[in-house]
Every structure is written in structure tokens, then in C-alpha cells.
């Protein structure tokens, strides 16, 4: 079955750029999506189809996907961006695969 | 405004059954695939099941295949998940989620409902 891997944690200073990676075999040939989840809340879609941002999601969130790695970038990180972030890919056999999540801490 | 509201959760014994429901509003329900995703408290998200817009095509994670059944009532804008032969490892918060355009992601999520499986 297909798997994607994320780092368990990322720390970033307030106002700086956070990059969260998601790795999987030929992930760049599949669509990657990203979800933000704060404690006690439901996940929120922040990036879909690699680079698209849903309405209402701040422009500081961006995505890329190439080769074996998808990346979620948060520019000018704010304290309210502190959350768990999950990448998700689609695979014909699995078919919806989530990474284990990355906890983003804003220092 | 899209809203998804789950109901039907609660403590169930191992081997027991439970039916979850998800009431949808704010969008044309019969035009979207719908999903169930679960999350063990403190752990990650795991996709459980999917149903297409008219209910004719379903798919399941291997861990629940043969025990869980997803269905929908488009007249009532409601999604269901019937769970049987429940195990302790099915204990989780269950979210209903709307499938995004193209079917590759989830664009709206419910608030989730806890299903503890324990004797």
C-alpha cells in the first residue's frame, strides 16, 4: 500500500517561514493536499491539488509537489498557525493516504 | 454555508453495532462524493470509506471492509455509516467529510463524533 512520510515536528520563529515536507514514491505524479488541525477541532483544508488554496485560506499558505516530495510552506508564520498539519495523497490502491502529521510550533 | 453534523456515537461493546449519521446542509448534497475519516485521540487521520454521489459506488479501507457499510439518503441529505463487529481498535473520533472536486481531497469536515468500543 502507498505511504507518505512527514517529520513529526517543525519549529519556526514568529514571522519566519515554515516548510513542512511530505515524502512518498513518485508523489509528484499524484495530487497532494494539506490539512490544518488545531487541538479539539476538525481538520481544515489549506492546500489541494498540490498548489491550490481554498477561499478563506490566507495567502501565506502555499504548496508545491515534485519528484517524491510535496511541501507546505507557511510564510510569515503567525502564532495562530500553530497546529498539526497533515498531508494527504490519492492512490488507486489505497486510495486516500494521510501522513502521520507534523506539529508546527511557533516560537 | 456548508455544514456537516455527525450524530449517533456513543459507547459500544466489542462485537456490537452502531450507526453513525451525518446531516449535510448548505450545498447540493446529491452532487458530491462523501467520506468517513477517523482519528484515534492523539493520533493521525485515517480514511475509512467513500460513497459516490448517487450511492451506487462505495469503497472501504481494508481495516473495515466487510464490517462497515456506508450509505446515503439523498432525499434527506444524510450520510450513514453502519458499523458492526466492532473492535477496541475501532475506537476513534469519526468525521464525515465532503469530497472535493475531482475526488482527490476533502474540502469540508464535520465536527466529529467519538465512538468508544469497550466492555
Image: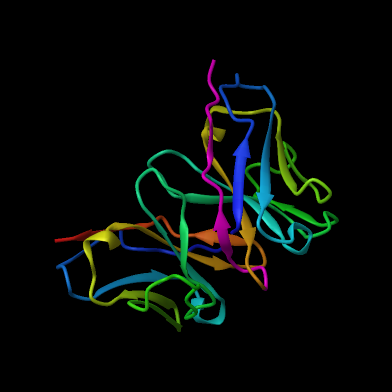
Q: Decide if residue B44 is in sight here.
A: yes
Residue A11, given in percent of the width and then of the height, sits at 19, 63
Residue B75, given in percent of the width and then of the height, sits at 84, 49
Residue B96, given in percent of the width and then of the height, sits at 61, 48
Residue B22 drawn above or below residue A70: above
The image quadrant that residue B31 belongs to is bottom right
User: In the drawing, does residue A26 fall left or right of residue B36?
Assistant: left
Residue B46 drawn above or below residue A54: above
Instruction: Name the residue nearer the viewer: A32 or A77.
Output: A77
Q: Decide if residue A1 is in sight here.
A: no
Q: Quadrant of the N terminus of chain A?
A: bottom right
Is residue B113 located in the magenta-colored stretch of the structure? Answer: yes
Give the magenta range.
B102-119
User: In the drawing, does residue A28 fall left or right of residue A78?
Assistant: right
What residue is drawn where x is 72% and y is 46%? Answer: B79
Residue A32, given in percent of the width and then of the height, sits at 51, 73
Image color mode? rainbow
User: In the drawing, does residue B93 fall left or right of residue B31?
Assistant: left
**Majority secondary structure of magenta residues:** loop
Instruction: Name the residue nearer the viewer: A64 or A75.
Output: A75
What residue is drawn where x is 60% and y is 19%? Answer: B13
What residue is drawn where x is 68% and y is 38%? Answer: B21
What residue is drawn where x is 29% and y is 62%? Answer: A81
Amino acid at each position: 500500500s502507498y505511504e507518505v512520510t512527514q517529520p513529526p515536528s517543525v519549529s519556526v520563529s514568529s514571522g519566519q517561514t515554515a516548510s513542512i515536507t511530505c515524502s512518498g514514491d513518485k508523489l509528484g505524479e499524484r495530487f497532494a493536499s494539506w490539512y490544518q488541525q488545531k487541538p479539539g477541532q476538525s481538520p481544515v483544508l489549506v492546500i489541494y491539488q498540490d498548489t491550490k488554496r481554498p477561499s478563506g485560506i490566507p495567502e501565506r499558505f502555499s504548496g508545491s509537489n515534485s519528484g517524491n516530495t510535496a511541501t507546505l510552506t507557511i510564510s510569515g508564520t503567525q502564532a495562530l498557525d500553530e497546529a498539526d498539519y497533515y498531508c494527504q495523497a490519492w492512490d488507486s490502491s489505497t486510495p486516500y493516504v494521510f501522513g502521520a502529521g507534523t506539529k508546527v510550533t511557533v516560537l | 454555508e456548508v455544514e456537516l453534523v455527525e450524530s449517533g456515537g456513543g459507547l459500544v461493546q466489542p462485537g456490537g453495532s452502531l450507526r453513525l449519521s451525518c446531516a449535510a446542509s448548505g450545498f447540493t448534497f446529491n452532487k458530491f462524493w462523501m467520506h468517513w475519516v477517523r482519528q484515534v485521540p492523539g493520533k493521525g487521520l485515517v480514511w475509512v470509506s467513500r460513497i459516490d454521489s448517487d450511492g451506487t459506488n462505495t469503497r472501504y479501507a481494508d481495516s473495515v471492509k466487510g464490517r462497515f457499510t456506508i450509505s446515503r439518503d439523498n432525499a434527506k441529505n444524510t450520510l450513514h455509516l453502519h458499523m458492526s463487529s466492532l473492535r477496541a481498535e475501532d475506537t476513534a473520533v469519526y468525521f464525515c467529510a465532503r469530497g472535493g472536486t475531482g475526488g482527490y481531497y476533502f474540502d469540508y469536515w464535520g465536527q466529529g463524533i467519538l465512538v468508544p468500543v469497550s466492555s
